[in-house]
Image: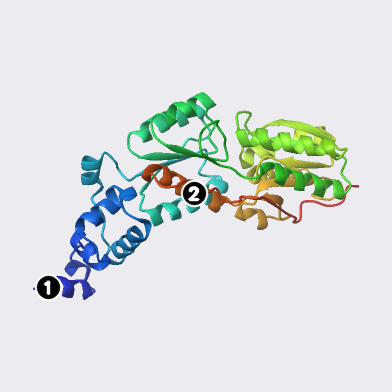
Amino acid sequence: MLNRSAARRHHDPEDVITATIRDVAAAAGVSPATVSRAFGRPEKVDESTRRRIVEAAERLGYQPNRAAQSLTTGRTGNIGIMVPDLANPFFTSVLKGAQHQANRLGHPVLLADTEEDPSAELRFSRALAQQVDGLVLCGSLMSDDEVLQISRLRPLVLVNRQVPKLPAITVDNAGGARQAVTHLRALGHRRIGYVAGPPGSYSNAERYQAVSEHAEGAGLECVPVGHFEPSFEGGRGAADQVLLAGVSAVVVYNDVMALGLVNQLVAYGVAVPAEISVVGFDDIPIAAMFTPALTTVRIPREQAGGAAVAHLHALLTGGRPVPPPDLTTELVVRGTTARSR
């Protein structure tokens, strides 16, 4: 028979003995009760001690018994994250940042994709609230009243959405829009279009308002070009209306739509950017791989996801809320913008 320490050094998985709470306590130099509090009631343990315990647990492969903790503390340790569309690389990047931060803080993550449906988001939020300690809502399409309903069930943090009196991680959409308009004006464009996303989207409304205000302030004409699904096919579907609008450049709600628009314009034989310039929003990875590469407004997506989870953790543990990071936007000029004819 192998003793415990020998078993841990052995490389055969069948011989490895699962680490216990006492093993973690010994490795971290604390009592088993402190280890239990670190995972069940982290607000009762100072940050340096908790970090030492988490590192010891990771080294030993220790997994706390979440079911037992839930019975004794009324908490699961889980957090829920809601996104409108997992197929959109923007939300995949936000999730990556959120998951990384959740792992660091010891929170298992439950995920729901609402498929751009506000009623589904409300149903999923209510269901998730029964299984988690808190929620992160990314780009929520629910009404303010519906979001407030969910906030009464569980603490929550919003990403790229604002509701009065609720914590939110927001990006500088207005600054990005200003950079896009300034860039197009410098290229000689005087009549620009805005290709809108869903009518109920907070970020869409914010981006359109910013583009139109900055265009007016710069002496440009801004033409609204309908509302379309925030997808590649939605962007392709916007091509006819863009051409009918008689604009020399467009700013598009997001990159996925912008890429679809460019794809359809090229299929029509329209030269991009020689005949029409296109600017997206988000700077998803494929934007740089596309031909022509997309000019777009870069948003710090992973940083936003991580900041939301850090803020939620502070709410759940009674800690001091983490100051929101400076999520500035940046115009990345590539191949879909050029001087106006």
Residue 228 image offset from top left, x and y in percent: 65, 33
Residue 271 in view, yes or no: no
Q: Label 1 sits on what residue type?
A: Asn
**Helix, strand or loop at mark 1:** loop
Q: Are marks 2 and 1 in contact (CB under 8 Å)?
A: no
Q: Residue extending furthest top?
A: 145
Q: Give whichever of 270, 4 is nearer the camera.
A: 4
Residue that label 1 marks: 3
Among the 4 quarters of the image, the one containing residue 18: bottom left
- Circle 2 residue: 322
Position of residue 69 measured from the top left corner of the image (x, y, whole percent):
24, 45
* Above/below status of 79 relative to 287: above
Left or right: residue 299 versus residue 73 is right
From mark 2 to mark 1, how far is it between C-alphas? 45 Å
| Label drawn at residue 218 | none
Crowding at mark 2 (Cα within 10 Å: few <14, some 14-19, many 20+): some
Residue at the (32%, 37%) spot, across then down? 131
Callout 1: few (<14), some (14-19), or many (20+) C-alpha neighbours within 10 Å? few
**Which of the 4 image quarters holds residue 24?**
bottom left
User: Residue 41 at what x, y percent from top left?
Assistant: 29, 47
